[in-house]
Structures are given as structure tokens and as C-alpha cells.
């Protein structure tokens, strides 16, 4: 917001040779932070600075540098730091290596939103991954982003697909009473009792 002399109280603006506008501001950490992109007009840049100023005043500001780490780097560190059993660690590492890092690892943590998560999950299923394996991968990614939220790298967890973390194994079919009796009639006599007992 400009003061009476026309200068901004928060942040700074600069018109580039291209005609676009650049915005930057002094963060609570004492460092200057540029906007992640330039703006077509001065008013757009001013509005962006106003949003950042409101986040700082409300205590909702996040250091943008923290979210710029690649998800591949963050995920590998997460796996290393997690205190789990050896079996769980091996399972997590396998899921990460085969189903997560090749698809999401190249993106920055703050670049991965709900849409990208949906696309990644759909791609896993389209490429023949089982629903069970896909659900495990989704749970792993959701846990990683939950930690990223706690670390102040992002504001919200992008994993918000209802039911994506669940997989129900189909119930095994059971023989009907008639089928059991028919089976008991065709097996050798000494096994009939076992067949009938198995139905109880």
C-alpha cells in the first residue's frame, strides 16, 4: 500500500525492460524475497505484495525458500530420518523408488498441488500398478507432505483424494452348503469328514 509520498510502506516494485513488473519484499527473516514470477501490470504486483504483507501480519507467512527443495531430495531425507522397523523401511523405500520418485521427484515441494497428485495417482493405475500398491504409494506421499506442512514448507497437504489411501481385498468366495455336500460325495470316504468339518 503506497504512503502519502507515493512510495510503498511494504515491499518494492520495479518495471523491467520487458514492460513486466518485479516485486520483492523484506521478510520476517530479514532477507529480501522476490516474487516467484513477474507481473503483467503494476497493480497485479501491488496486490501480490498486499497478500504477502497480510500473511506476515497474521503469522501465516512461510519462507518460500523452504518449499523450493525438490520433492526427490525431501523424500529421500524423510525416509532416512523416519524411525520405523527395518521391514517398514524396506517397504517404504521400495514404494518410493518404484512408484513415487520417478513421477514426482523432479518437482519442487511447493509445486505439487492436488491436481498433480491426482494426475500421478491416475498414471500409476493406468500403467498397471495394482490398487493396493497405489494406495500404499499414496499413503507414503501423504505422510511426507504432512511432515512438509509441519516443517513450514507448504501450507496445506496436496493429498486430498477421498478414499485413495484405502484398498479392500475382495473377500474370498466360500462354497455353499450344497457344493460342500456334492464335494463330500466325490472325494474318497476317508476325506469326507474333513470336507464336511471344513464347512462348519
Image (tube, grey):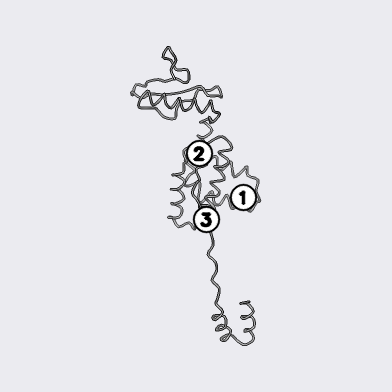
Q: Which residue is drawn at 52% across and 55% down?
A: 133
Q: Give 92 or 134, whichever is nearer the viewer.
A: 134
Q: Give 133 or 55, whichever is nearer the viewer.
A: 55
Q: How far apart are marks 1 and 2 (CA)?
A: 22 Å
Q: Quadrant of residue 22?
A: top left
The image shows residue 39 at horizontal and vertical percentages of: 38, 27
The residue at which mark 3 appears reads as 133
The residue at which mark 2 appears reads as 109
The image shows residue 46 at horizontal and vertical percentages of: 41, 23
* Nearest-to-viewer mark from 1 and 2: 2
The residue at which mark 1 appears reads as 89
Where disc 2 sits, the SS reads helix
Circle 1 crowding by C-alpha within 10 Å: few under 14, some 14–19, many from 20: some
Q: Which circle's residue, 1 or 3, is located before the other in the chain?
A: 1
Q: Residue at x 64, y 79 (%)?
A: 197
The image shows residue 98 at horizontal and vertical percentages of: 51, 51
In the rendered image, the quadrant that contains the N terminus is top left
Amino acid at each position: 500500500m503506497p504512503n502519502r509520498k507515493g512510495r510503498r510502506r511494504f515491499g518494492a516494485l520495479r518495471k523491467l525492460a520487458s514492460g513486466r513488473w518485479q516485486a520483492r519484499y523484506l521478510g520476517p527473516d530479514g532477507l529480501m524475497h522476490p516474487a516467484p514470477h513477474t507481473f503483467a501490470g503494476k497493480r497485479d504486483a501491488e496486490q501480490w505484495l498486499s497478500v504477502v504483507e497480510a500473511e506476515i501480519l497474521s503469522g501465516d507467512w512461510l519462507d518460500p525458500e523452504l518449499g523450493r527443495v525438490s520433492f526427490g531430495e525431501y523424500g529421500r531425507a524423510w525416509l532416512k530420518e523416519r524411525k520405523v522397523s527395518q521391514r517398514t523401511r524396506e517397504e517404504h523405500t521400495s514404494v518410493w523408488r518404484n512408484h513415487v520418485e520417478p513421477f514426482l521427484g523432479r518437482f519442487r515441494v511447493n509445486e505439487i498441488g492436488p491436481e498433480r497428485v491426482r494426475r500421478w495417482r491416475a498414471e500409476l493405475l493406468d500403467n498397471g500398478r495394482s490398487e493396493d500398491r497405489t494406495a500404499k504409494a499414496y499413503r507414503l506421499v501423504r505422510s511426507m507432505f504432512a511432515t512438509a506442512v509441519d516443517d513450514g514448507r507448504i501450507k496445506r497437504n496436496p493429498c486430498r483424494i477421498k478414499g485413495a489411501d484405502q484398498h479392500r481385498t475382495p473377500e474370498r468366495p466360500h462354497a455353499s452348503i450344497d457344493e460342500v455336500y456334492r464335494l463330500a460325495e466325490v472325494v474318497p470316504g476317508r476325506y469326507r469328514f474333513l470336507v464336511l468339518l471344513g464347512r462348519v
